[in-house]
Image (spheres, rainbow, N blue to C red):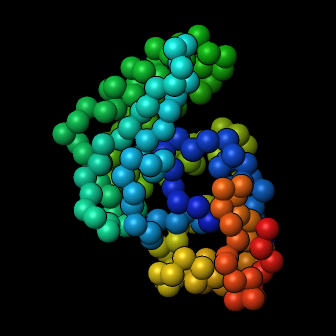
Amino acid sequence: MRVTIHQPQFLPWLGYLDKIDQADLFIALDSVQFKKNEWQNRNRIRTAGGCQWVTVPVLHRFGQLVKDVQVNQAVNWQRQHRHAIEMHYAQAPFRDRYLPELLSLYAMPWERLHELNMRVLRWLLRAYGITTPVRCASEWGAREEPTDRLIDLCHAVGASGYLSGPGGAPPKSPRRCRCCTCN
């Protein structure tokens, strides 16, 4: 079984989805430290004038895990996102097929960023016909050192292969990763 592991992202890009599609199992790395103003809580949408950032405001403490970060309910970010998406994608092909469900995700109350990101990810996977199962790293105990964490997760699921993305690298010590081959 070929596994890929990555931190959850807000509105992930096509390369992220492609990596999931190439794997037999995707593990969302929700048990690592959250980094504000990275892809975990924001992304860009394409507009006629270029790109526009859409950011989910969060409440977090330094060192807080991705799975524990709360969405800041004091900011009306959902209305802002809905407006931007409706305005910039009103004439997009397939809008009738995809926009209603995407906009319905913005109508839901979100307490945790991780829950939102996982729901958006599952919607995108369905929309693209990607059937790779999705699990969360927090389901298993894993060591904190990055290479050890990947190895522990691969062992936990019985992986025979690990797929890293173009920006990532396989575990630093392939000899330590006896459970699988690293691509």
Left/right placement of residue 76 relative to residue 122 reads: left
Which quadrant holds the C terminus? bottom right
Rendered view: 74 above or below 136: above
160 vs 49, left or right, is: right
Image quarter of the N terminus: bottom right
The count of marks equals 0
The quarter of the picture where residue 34 lies is: bottom left
Between 97 and 36, the one lying in front of the other is: 36
- Whether residue 158 can be seen here: no
Q: Please report the residue visible at 68 percent of the width from the left and 66 percent of the height from the top.
A: 169
Can you give x and y, in whole percent of width and height, for residue 13 in the image? 61, 42
Instruction: Pick out the residue farthest to the left.
Output: 74
Tell me what residue is drawn at x 44 percent, y 69 percent.
32
In this view, which residue lies farthest toward the top? 91
Residue 98, image x, y percentages: 59, 27
Residue at the extreme front of the image, as rendered = 172
Q: Report x, y in % for residue 146.
A: 54, 76
